[in-house]
Image (spheres, rainbow, N blue to C red):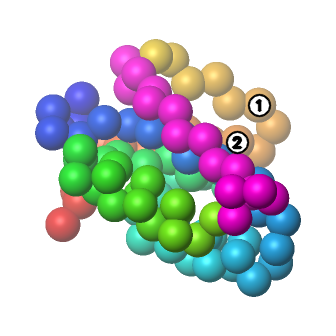
Amino acid sequence: MLNSARNLYLICYDVASPKRLCQVHKFLLGYKVGGQKSFFECWLTTAELRDVRRGLAERLNEQDDRAHIFQLDPRQKINCIGRAQPVNTSNFMIL
């Protein structure tokens, strides 16, 4: 594991409004280490996860939008299909 204080999460979202979609996307860019379009892989501490949940709640409309946060097991084998590539974590550092 990269850092025992961090856990790997997959954050995915579906946002109805283009304006809110842009806000959510820009917000999550600060946390992602990999992913595509509306699926981001993020190594987060407990405090960062709390910030992500709070930030999403502030940006999403509960009636129209949705977001899912899944904690992933970093020990599991990654299966890539097509152009997908696993995130390179060999030289990985979060400052």
**Crowding near pointer 2: few (<14 within 10 Å), some, many (20+)?**
few
Instruction: Read off the residue under disc 1.
Output: 81
Q: Position of residue 20 (x, y in %)?
A: 70, 76
Q: Position of residue 43 (x, y in %)?
A: 35, 46
At 23% across and 45% down in the image, what residue appears? 46
Q: How many marks?
A: 2
Residue type at numbered disc 2: Ala
Do residues under tags 2 and 1 come within 8 Å of each other at their CB atoms?
A: yes
Quadrant location of the N terminus in the rendered image: top left
At 52% across and 69% down in the image, what residue appears? 58
Instruction: Read off the residue under disc 2.
Output: 84
Q: Position of residue 31 (x, y in %)?
A: 41, 62
In magenta, the rendered stretch is 61-75
**Crowding near pointer 1: few (<14 within 10 Å), some, many (20+)?**
few
Residue 93, located in which quarter of the rendered image? Answer: bottom left
Q: Position of residue 67 (x, y in %)?
A: 64, 49
Tell me, yes or no, if residue 3 can be seen here: yes
